[in-house]
Each structure stands twice: as C-alpha cells, then as structure tokens.
Image (spheres, helix red, strand yellow):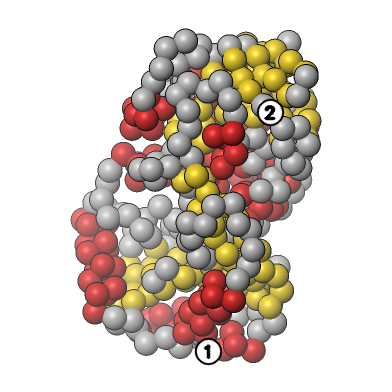
Amino acid sequence: MHDVIVIGGGVIGLSIARELAGRKSVLLLDRGSTGQGTSRAAAGMLTPLSEADDQGPFFQLCRASHAMYDGFVQDLQSETGSDVGYSTDGLLCLSSSEDSANVIQRRYEWQKNAGFDVQLLSADAVHEMEPLVTVPICTAVFIPGDRSVTPRRLVNALREACFNRGVEIRTGLHVDSIARNQVRVGKMILEAANIVIASGVWSPELSGLDPPIPVYPRKGQILSLGMPAGAFRRMIRWGSSYFVPRSSGELVVGATNEDVGFDLSNTPAGLGRLLMDAQQISSHVGAYPILETWTGLRPATPDELPILGPSAIPGVYYATGHYRNGVLLAPITAAIVSDLVRGRKPGFAIDAYAPSRFGMGHV
C-alpha cells in the first residue's frame, strides 16, 4: 500500500508526484507513456499578463505559479542536469487593427497602474527588438517578465526527478475506477491512503468519482518551423496566433482552439490558418522549412477554470482541467496538492476551483 497514487503522468501529475516524494511513498499511473499527451503538445508559454483583463482569482493563481518558476526550473536542472529550454526573453503583443489595439491598450493601462512591468512600444521600437516582424503595427506592448519553457524537455526532467526521488511509475495502465483508498486497473486493485486525479482530458472516464469531472477536450493544432540562428528572440503574440522561438532553432507557431472531441488530426484548415498568420507576422517565415506538425487536447471545463481540491470521497483529490495553463500552473498545483495530502491548509486560496462547484454527492 502506497501513501499516494497519482493518476496521470503529464506535467501536472509528474510535478505533484515529485513534490510529494520523499515525504510520502508515491505510485504514479499513466495510461500511456508519461508526458506524451497534452503536455508534449504544449507550446510552453508562461505568460499570465498577456491575456489578463483584470486581477481576478485565476490571474492571481497564474501569477503566483509564474513567480515560482525560476526556482522550480533551477531545482529541476540541479536535480537532473537537464536543460528544460527555459527562456526569460519576454513577450511582444502586437496589434494591427483599431479593435485589437484598444484591447492591448486597456490591458497595458490597468497592468501599468497595478505596478506590473509592461512597456508600450512604437512600431520602430518593435523593429529594433525583432527586425523580421513585417505585420503593420498599430500598438505594441512588451512584457519583459514573461517566460517560456520547452514542455517535452520539462516532462523528461520531471520524470527523471521523480525516479531520483523514489517515485514508482507504471505506464500503459488504464484506470477503470476509484473508491476510497482503492484504484482498480482491470482485475488489479491498488491501495493508497490518498489518490490524486491528474489525468487531464481522460479524467471523466474514471468511474466512482464524486463529483463527476466535467472536463472535455479542446483540440489545438500547432507546428514548428526551422528558423535561422537568432531570427527571433522573443515570443510574439498577434491575435490568436503566436511565435515561441527556441534556442534549438525551432520556431513554434500556434495554435487552433477547436471543439471537435478527441480528434487528433491535423487539417488543411487548421494548419493553413497558422501558416497564413505566421506569414502575416513575418513574411520571412514563408521560406522556413516546416519541421513538425502536431495536435494536443486541452482539458477544458465549463467555466475554463481548473478543478483543484478535495472530492466528496475522503482522501481523493482533484488536480485536473487546467485547460491552456497546465504547464504554467504545474508548480503551484503541486504545492497545493502536497499541502492537502499532508493535511495542511494550502498557502493559496482554492475555493474558486473547488470540485463542489459542479455539484457534490455523498459517499
């Protein structure tokens, strides 16, 4: 019998397992290979300011996790010797229309008034920072504190850190149901004092959950281009499209947001829109080779907020439904779940993410 069973081996599940290991005996179960689902498909943007219109509870959660990232990455790299592709070069938000300029201007003003480091830029200033940008610019804002990480490298480092800390990882196991202190996998019963549901879009398929988890997939198509060395340094957001440059020479271009169930196909419409937007941001990228195309399934909830906290079943905790922010929220989610499992009040308010907001039964 383990102290904790974590169901799900993406960035959230691995971060939780790593955080608990050492104090607790931890078993992590994954339906596939760890980190090969939604986490592998993510772009790795750590940018809470770039889409925030106010200082609501979710923004505060994202900011708190963002503030943990420097230490999170430093500790991971020290533990494993792995480079997780962490970039601190910031993000440029560009607008090319009056409507989008108004949105960016409003965000800039409240963020500046709130004391955040945001900088309003002229088109000339943008071109000094990123000479290859060719889209017409009405307004631009630079957020120097925004970060990015390479998710595939991150999950590899997390997996290695889990091994180093004594986490037992079993892959290729489909969990059928859970009950108090029990997880059923086929005819096998696994026991633990605590169970953490961190299986993203697959969470609703577990029977026995109370309350049920209203998570559903939102498909994101994404691609990468091979860019010349130093072509782009900073992340660039333009409308719903973005660039994430990597030190490896990849330029990640994303992403669609589609409600099409568990369809993982890449489509001409999806990739075509990304390629068209990419060439709007910079006409130069039209000559770059396409390195890879892929798709991920974001675990969305009806209110687009994560499900985080205790269920109606004693010892069962939810850490799922992180939608587009799983990579960003990994450090703080791990800290919160660790506190809950250890019987401590989390250091961050989680009432807004309680599973009970979707209805709680009685066990």
Residue 108 image offset from top left, x and y in percent:
27, 63
Find disc 1 in the rendering and name its residue: 283
Which amino acid is tagged 1? Ser
Residue 194, above or below 285:
above
Contact (Cβ within 8 Å) of mark 2 with mark 1 = no
Residue 81 visible in the picture: yes
Question: Which residue is drawn at the image coordinates 71% and 74% (left, top)?
Answer: 291
Q: Is residue 323 left or right of residue 59?
A: right
Quadrant location of the N terminus?
A: top right
Please tell me in which quadrant of the rendered image residue 204 appears: top right
Question: Which residue is drawn at the image coordinates 65% and 34% (left, top)?
Answer: 8
| Element carrying mark 1 | helix
Residue closest to the eye, 91 or 202: 202
Residue 293 image offset from top left, x and y in percent:
67, 69
Residue 232, above or below 196:
below
In space, the residues marked 2 and 1 are separated at their CA atoms by 48 Å
Residue 238 image offset from top left, x and y in percent:
41, 73
Residue 178, above or below 237:
above
Residue 325 — which label? none
Residue closest to the eye, 13 or 218: 218
Label 2: how many residues lie within 10 Å, few (<14), some (14-19) or many (20+)?
Answer: many
Q: Is residue 324 left or right of residue 171?
A: left
Residue 175 — which label? 2
Label located before the other in sequence (2 or 1): 2
Residue closest to the eye, 116 or 158: 158
Disc tally is 2
Residue 354 image offset from top left, x and y in percent:
39, 27
Residue 45 visible in the picture: no
